[in-house]
Amino acid sequence: MKTIQFREALGEAMSEEMRRDKNVFLMGEEVAEYNGAYKVSQGMLDEFGPDRIIDTPIAELGFAGIAVGASMNGLRPIVEFMTWNFAILAADQIINSAAKMLQMSGGQFNCPIVFRGGNGTAGQLAATHSQAFESFYANVPGLKVCTPSNPYDAKGLMKSAIRDDNPVLILESEKMYGDKGEVPETEYLIPIGKADIKRKGKDVTIVTFGKIIKLAQETAEILAKEGIDCEIIDLRTIRPLDYATVVESVKRTGRCVVLEESHPLGSISSEIAYHLQRYAFDYLDAPVQRVTQSDTPFPFAKPLMAEALPNVKRLVNAIKDTMYVS
């Protein structure tokens, strides 16, 4: 094992797959000459050249469309958006072309594309640059959606995504690019659609994904001192969602709190709560709780940011509610 940064794990995955398959290429804003806005593509232009590491204009809809056409003709593009907030402009190509092409063409054309970039809140970036898009894109059949929480998962999921014959979205966090973690020296893949139990516990299941898993881990340590043993499930993939791992965990613990960074209406937490009441109702000892971002546009002022985002206090209270409701 070696210890590398989150950004390095993503870069290694892309470089390894580009060496493996000459049809893989990277395109996006500042990915080449500038080595990527967050230095994920550091050194890739030097190794692969400008034909495979391609700087684009600030025109998300345009270069997403180029990627769709390239993928239909046998290439395997990786498209970097500087942030998923900017990718709203490319949503027509992602949702109406890439996601639907296989069905609309009667199975004649796959779209093996990876769309990736920064997602969610990242400091004082205000409402239009602080959105988490997992539930937005997970609502679209034909797309796969992944949100890794650490370097190991980031590399394994990225390699699987590049090899997948369907459009896969990798939603990263700008606040995690510098995070360090252990990654194997040898090649490995993480299957898309398989959750991971990051912490074993017997009293309550916390279901979460992405960078906010750090909040779950911090809370679990606090509650362990009070005798509450939390199990933490990292979904890793939002679509397809690993319902089975969640259900089996809740059958053991009898309680569940879903933690996510996005808004409450039409959320991943809503979907999980529905699924548990449908398929694990007899095992639940308390109603499913959820802790999400406030149902408002994200604020700029730091005190308001702290109130809008999930925090330890809110998560502790939600878990204790499940423990003391019978």
Image (cartoon, rainbow, N blue to C red):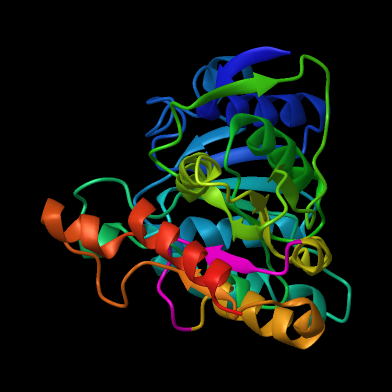
In this view of the protein, which residue sits in the foreground, 138 or 16? 138
Q: Main secondary structure of the magenta part?
A: loop
Decide: is 171 above or below 270: above
Magenta segment: 253-265
Camera-nearest residue between 262 and 254: 254
Q: Quadrant of residue 187?
A: top right
Residue 28 in the image, given as x and y percentages of width and height = 47, 44
Q: Position of residue 196 (x, y in %)?
A: 74, 47
Which image quarter: residue 111?
Answer: bottom right
Q: Seen from this angle, which residue lies furthest bottom?
A: 278
Q: Tell me: 120 left or right of 22.
A: left
- Give left or right: position of 302 versus 183: left
Rendered-image quadrant of the C terminus: bottom right
The residue at 72%/69% (across/down) is 254
Q: Residue at x 76, y 84 (%)?
A: 281
Residue in view at x 55 percent, y 15 percent: 46
Q: Position of residue 54 (x, y in %)?
A: 51, 36
**Res 149 visible:** yes
Query: What is the number of callouts on the image?
Result: 0
- Asked whether residue 264 is drawn in magenta, I would say yes
- Residue pictured at 51% horizontal, 49% vertical: 216
- In the image, residue 253 sits, relative to residue 322, either above or below, namely above
Is residue 167 positioned above or below 216 on the image?
Answer: below
- In which quadrant will I find the N terminus? top right
Q: Is residue 62 left or right of residue 168?
A: left
Asked if residue 93 can be seen in this view, the reply is no
The location of residue 188, given as percent across then percent down, is: 83, 29
